[in-house]
Amino acid sequence: MYIPAHFEESRTEILHALVRAHPFASLITQSSPDGINANHIPLCLSHEHGQFGVLRGHVARSNPMWGELALNAEAMAIFQGPDSYITPSWYPTKQKHGKVVPTWNYAVVHAHGLLTVIDDSSWLRSHLETLVIQQEALFSEPWSVSDAPKEFTDKLIGEIVGIEMVITRLKGKWKISQNQPAQNQAGVVCGLKKSGGRNAVEMAGMIEAVLRHAHHKTTETD
């Protein structure tokens, strides 16, 4: 991934926050017969191992991906955060000189590591309970795996296989108007908030967070 210095986000806690907020990942692997392969699955992040943590997920037993992983080949999980089209009409400098063009703001995290296949029903049940607890926390009456008959969930667990990836590299690209002057950044925040929508509002919040961080760093060096 091409990351200009002013768009790089390297703070692990910030990258982890995006992974948790947007757990539905594109998992890229190198499979033997077909070359590069992509699967789209939710992944749970845990701090148990390594500098950057570990990702856990599952795929259908009928999915050939888990049986075709190339030996010692690195996998990559891509987590896509909010993205928004940015119109130059939001830039105050448009009125001054007109030298502005549209762009697209986005935040993305790439996690790299070796995948391990885990074919163990106890591990899978624990993983599914963790995944469900995380996602059901949004609801007033959260559903639990134990709400379903055990013989039913046992049968379904037998139809999936677990995967685990200890993260060895973690990269983040926050392309969120850092290359614009402060007045244009403020204009983008205002425009996004007015346009509404989850992506737009979340992107506006990310820009504001970067502005606060930059202001804090400036204050510390003054």
Image: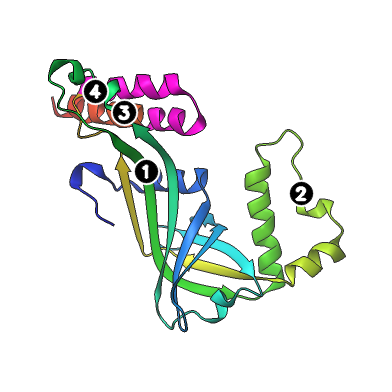
Local SS, label 1: strand
- Give the label, 1 or 2, closer to the camera: 1
Horizontal relation, residue 75 to residue 219: left or right: right
- Give the label, 1 or 3, closer to the camera: 3
**Residue position marked by numbered label 4 in the rendering:** 184
Q: Spatial distance from mark 3 to mark 4, Cα to Cα?
A: 11 Å
Q: Spatial distance from mark 2 to mark 4, Cα to Cα?
A: 46 Å
Q: Amino acid at mark 3?
A: Thr
Stretch in magenta: 182-206
Q: Earlier in the sequence, mark 1 or mark 4?
A: 1
Q: Spatial distance from mark 1 to mark 4, Cα to Cα?
A: 19 Å
- In this orientation, which residue lies closer to the viewer: 14 or 3? 3
* Figure disc tally: 4
**Residue position marked by numbered label 2 in the rendering:** 144
Q: Spatial distance from mark 2 to mark 3, Cα to Cα?
A: 44 Å
Local SS, label 4: helix
Horizontal relation, residue 101 to residue 85: left or right: left
Q: Earlier in the sequence, mark 1 or mark 2?
A: 1
x then y, percent, for residue 26: 48, 59
x then y, percent, for residue 94: 20, 20
**Residue position marked by numbered label 1 in the rendering:** 107
